[in-house]
Image (tube, helix red, strand yellow):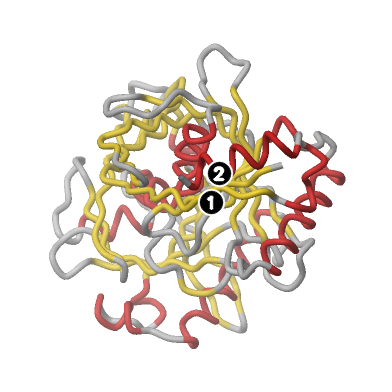
Amino acid sequence: MIGHLAYAAGSPCPTFVLDAGRLPRDEEALLAHLAEARRYLVSAGGAHVLKFALVEPSAHPMFDLDYRFVQALPGAPDRFDTRGSCGHSILAAVVAASRSGMLPRLVPGARIRVHVRNNGDSVVCEADRIERDEAGFTVTFVHPAPVPFPDLLPAGRPRTVLGSGGERAEVSLVASANAYAFVDARTLGVPDQAALFAAGQQLLDRLEGIRGAAADRLGWPRAGAFPKIAAVLPAERGGIAVRAVTVSGWHPSIALTGVVCLGSAARIPGTVPWRVAREHGAGDGPVDVFTPGGRTAVTAVTAAPGTAGGEGALLWATVARKRVTFQGSFVLAPLSHLQFEEVAKCLALSGAA
């Protein structure tokens, strides 16, 4: 069997992409195979690769690609979380699937429709530019029907108070693309964007504690990767400044799903991001998002209150200017029995050419 590596700019690590059609469907057997793949990656110097994407052509007429995300967790090669998704890995999977022949060759204007098996999301990846080993995309998370705002609030309200380490923190639990806990950084003693981006282990530990309390609130294991957490406050130049946490510590920017979730939250009245966005008079258009890794923007399109059963509803959210670099293909020795060796070697050589 061969694996493909692709890196989406802004992600904490590359994504390792595998053909789901050649892997077991049984969950226990699947994760055992992924543990073998992870051990092989570690032995080859790839211990930093903590994202796995399992893809295959979709049997559904509305989609081109079925995608499943598996987050590897620190501590042991057989620790994984399959609960959530990853937008950066979706893009990496699209590029790898095209390079391997699973999808047609990407050209500018091509739209790849991805079905996320983890949570049922529909994602449209539109190729803006294609170069030798790099591609640029506009990504849209589309809902087949308007999603009422209350359905995006797993705690049942825009803001929830959680107890963590003897302190109480007000957060917004929002589930759009992924589940996130958003907290106003100023309530944790962080006054502005510069201080937020310079914060170290103390703030990280406090956010991890709040994230654990959010996992308790949702009935999810604290040791997993979900829900995610991010601290927000008004940016210096308008928009929202955000510092996000990933499984290995501070995120270098913010997850693509995090941008989508933040943009959605900023449209839901009463949430922490909604209040932060409006401190600079932000309207209902694109929201500028500033992270330690740079600036991006998200546009969440919603139905007006009263048009979708009451309080408003989310239709879709779009993030532009996402960049992916294909890093190559290679034979995955421990799983070579899952594909003819000759075919695997030829594909690996063609991908590396």
Tell me where residue 299 appears, x and y as whole percent: 27, 40
Which amino acid type corresponds to the residue marked 1 in the rendered image?
Leu
Secondary structure of residue under mark 2: helix
Mark 1 vs 2: CB contact within 8 A? no
Q: Is residue 15 above or below residue 58?
A: below
Residue shown at the point (24%, 60%) measured from the top left: 295
Which amino acid type corresponds to the residue marked 2 in the rendered image?
Leu
Could you tell me if residue 285 is visible in this image? Answer: yes
The mark tally for this picture is 2
Q: Quadrant of residue 283?
A: top left
Tell me where residue 203 appears, x and y as whole percent: 46, 82
Tell me where residue 90 appears, x and y as whole percent: 49, 41
Q: Residues within 10 Å of mark 1 (few under 14, many from 20)?
A: many
Q: Residues within 10 Å of mark 2 (few under 14, many from 20)?
A: some
Residue for badge 2: 349
Could you tell me if residue 312 is visible in this image? Answer: no
Q: What numbered label is drawn on residue 5?
A: 1
Q: Quadrant of residue 44?
A: bottom right
Camera-near label (1 vs 2) is 2
2 and 237: which is toward the camera: 2
Secondary structure of residue under mark 1: strand
